[in-house]
Image (tube, rainbow, N blue to C red):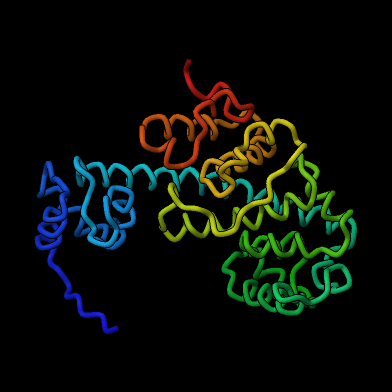
Amino acid sequence: MKYDKPALTVERQIQQLGSRGMAFADPKRAAHYLAELNYYRLSGYWLRHEADHGSHRFLPGTSFEAVLDDYLFDRTLKLLVLDAVERLEVSIRTRWAHVVGLRHGAHAHLDSALFKQRSQTWSHPTAVARLVSGVEDSRERFIRHLRHTYDELLPPIWASVEVMSLGQISRWFSNLRHAADRNAIAEPYGVDEVLLASFLHHISVVRNICAHHARFWDREMTFRAQLPRKHPEALVASLDPAGPNSAYNTLTLLGWLIGRTSPGQTWVQRVAEHVIQHPPAAGVMGFPTNFSQRPIWQHTTEE
C-alpha cells in the first residue's frame, strides 16, 4: 500500500486533533509546541488518551495540555534516569577494569583466553576491533598520549575502559570466561554475576531509549531484566513481579544499584517526588499503591 497522507501545517494539525475530540486551552501555545516537538513525537503521548486507535478519536475530556504534561514529565524522568545511568556506567567501568587488571594484567582485555568463545552475540576479535576504533577516535589527551607512547594495540585496561559505552562494558563483563571474575566485579552491587549481567543489559537498553529521546514512562521494556527471587531481600521486596516489564521495576533496579555505589544519594527521593507530582504517572508506570513502604522507596514520600 502506498503512503498518501500529505504533510500538514501546524494549524491543520490542531484542526485535525480538535476534530478528533482534543481540547485546546491555548491554541497559540499548542502551535508553539507542535512546531518545536513534532506532531509524530507527541502522538506517542496521546495514544493512551485515544478511545479508539483506528479512528484516533479521543476520550472525553482529553486536552492538549494533559498530553503536554505527560511529555514534560517524561522528559524530566529521562534526565533522572540518565543521571543514574551515568553513575552506574562509571562505577562498572572502574570495577571491571580494577578486578580484571589486578587479576590478569594491564592488557588482559587483549587476551582472548580470558573471554568466552564466539557466539551469535559475542566475538572477542570483533569487540577488540571496536575498542581499537573507539581509541583511535578518542580526543582524550591521556588516550592519545598512551597510543603514541607505547607499542601495544590498545592502552592498558584502566584507560581503554574509558572509551567503552555502557553496552560495550555490559558485553565485556558478561563474556568474561571465569565466573569468579564476574562475581568479584558483581560483589559490591549486592547481587551475583548472573543478575548483574542481566541488569546491565537491561539498563543499556533503557539508556539508549532515554539518550535518543524516545518515550520511556509508559514503555514495556523489550529486554526484561532477570528479577531476583530470594536475595538480596530488600531488592526482592521492592520489586513488583506482577509487572516485570514496567518502568517501576527499572527505576527500582537503578535505585538499588545507585544505593550501593553512592550511599546517601537522593536519587530515589527525587524520582519518587517527581512521580507523585504527576498524578497519572504511578499507575501508568506500574508503581504499586504501597511502593513508598517498600525498602528501596521507604522515606521517599511524606506520610
205 vs 127, nearest the viewer: 205
Q: Which residue occupies the extreme top position in the image? A: 303
The structure residue drawn at horizontal position 74% and vertical position 69%, both measured from the top left corner, is: 155
Judge left or right: residue 190 versus residue 204: right
Q: Position of residue 256 (x, y in %)?
A: 65, 37
The structure residue drawn at horizontal position 14% and vertical position 68%, both measured from the top left corner, is: 8
279 vs 299, nearest the viewer: 279
Q: Quadrant of residue 201?
A: bottom right
Q: Quadrant of residue 230?
A: top right
Q: Position of residue 234 (x, y in %)?
A: 70, 31
Judge left or right: residue 119 versus residue 15: right
The structure residue drawn at horizontal position 26% and vertical position 50%, both measured from the top left corner, is: 51
Above or below: residue 256 compared with residue 195: above
Q: Position of residue 83 (x, y in %)?
A: 52, 45
67 vs 182, nearest the viewer: 67
238 vs 256, nearest the viewer: 238
Q: Position of residue 167 (x, y in %)?
A: 63, 62
Above or below: residue 251 compared with residue 8: above
